[in-house]
Image (cartoon, rainbow, N blue to C red):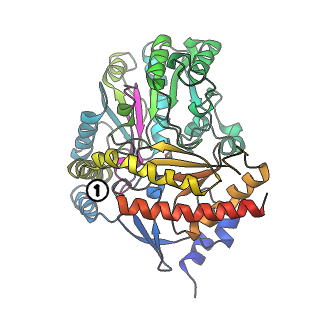
Amino acid sequence: MTTQRDLARQHLVPHFTGKRTWYEDDFPVFERGEGCYLFDTDGNRWLDGVAGLFCVNIGHGRTDLASVAAEQMGRLAYSSNWGMAHPAAIEAATMIAEVAPGDIDQIFFVSSGSEAVESAVKFARNYHLARGDDSRYKVISRNWAYHGTTLGALAVTGIPKNREPFLPNLWDGVRHVSNTGQCTSPKGTPADELSCVKAIEEVILTEGPETVAMVIAEPVQSGGGALVPPNGYWSALRRLCDRHGVLLCADEVVCAFGRFGHWFASERFDVVPDMITFAKGVTSAYQPLGGLAIRRPLVAEVYESPIGTFRHGSTFGGHPVATAVAVANMRAMREEGLFDHVLSTEDHFAQSLGSLAESHRSIREIRGAGFFYAIDLCVDRETRLDLSPTQEIGLQSGVLGGFIREARTTVRPDGRGYTGLNISPPLIADAEVIEDLTHRIDQILDRVDSWLDEND
Ligand code: PLP
């Protein structure tokens, strides 16, 4: 009998998936979701440890969101935001404007996180041109940062293995600097003096501030493994960008809509960036939607300039169905107290994961905050023995993924600047789900410990 998996192998080209995983492993085919759990076509129940791809924030199986989508399709399936508007996009933009930090209240919709990043790069250029600052176009981004896959967003991305094959296609205006995990300053260093802050200023000065358009960074960087910034880092970035007339963009494609207990994680780090990119959680992935939220005075400057336009757009940006679902999702998040739940549960979550360190020598560090964690692996925590290059390659190229599948969870194996696990469940996970998740991760780490014994 031809299975769904066989048909997938025949016709479906997977994203970022190696030939071996696709043709030799029993990858899951998920057919249903409920709360924090997914069900595959073989009848297995999986714990969704990364909320789809850091996006199903409100959990699976919300038929209320499905009804909103159906109702919107019946009433107005499509209208654009090009010289016209429709109530769903207007309401979604208004709601986001109300909860965005500071004077950020201008919302430009697209359909994905990559497009949101592209929009930020283009808005920064458009803004500087509007001010007559024609030479500003460069972007500063951080090592190991994932900002997307389209060519503009990929240029900004700092993951060598994703970028290098496409270098001839990427524009050369991006400079990568240390991320907060690569900071070499001792604890207690004032934020403005941190090596990872000074690295940005050094690049701005070397390139010439008059050529730099924008700095982009995630509030908590995913690549490198849930890198929570040192105290004061974001305020220092704000001061630095202001000093040099450079726009500051927080890429909150993962961080926004509750992952750190706030609408935007910038709020948690007490910063008002010039722009925020968002996607994923804005609809809890019930529809594809992304966007760029911009400080009002910046958009005003563009409109009042001779340029007068943000010269950018797309057919599906701000689609009626996607924006209607965003409104319903945000309303449910608010009414159901989802962010209070994250804030009141995060300590328990961190402790539960932390309890694993005692029984697994392969845990170097557990990092993160909110509902977003990484487990960084090594050979032996006590002796600080790093994984050998062979062990890293082995774990990253299928072994870790296999152990994760055995435990029937979707936590992600990660090889972006460290070897380990990415953990980021739906924000509705309660104590019982966290216990289940911790138990499954314990199982994965048992397998890692034994594998390291056999492959030292
Ligand atoms: N920016 C960040 C921080 C991301 O994590 C991602 C995707 O994971 C993107 C941008 C790209 O988003 P998308 O996959 O929707 O294009």
Q: Is residue 275 left or right of residue 452?
A: left
- In reply to whether residue 59 is colored magenta, the answer given is no
Residue 374 seen in the figure: yes
Q: Considering the numbered disc 1 on the image, is that residue within a helix, a strand or a loop?
A: loop
Q: Residue at x 47, y 19 (%)?
A: 236
Determine the residue positioned at 79% across, 57% down.
456
Compared with residue 421, is residue 251 higher up or lower down, i.e. above or below? Answer: above
Residue 253 occupies quadrant: top left
Residue that carries the numbered disc 1 in the rendered image: 77
Kind of residue at disc 1: Ala
x then y, percent, for residue 108 = 36, 36
User: At 40% from the left edge and 33% from the top edge, which residue is drawn?
Assistant: 276
Residue 318 coordinates in the image, percent (x, y): 34, 45
Asked whether residue 316 is in view, the answer is no
Residue under the image location 35 percent in, 17 percent down: 301
Vertical relation: 316 (above or below) 302: below
What span is colored magenta in the figure? 269-292
Q: Position of residue 287 (x, y in %)?
A: 36, 55
| Number of other residues with Cα within 10 Å of mark 1, as a class: few under 14, some 14 to 19, many 20 or more | few
Please provide percent x and percent y for residue 330: 27, 48
Tag count in the figure? 1
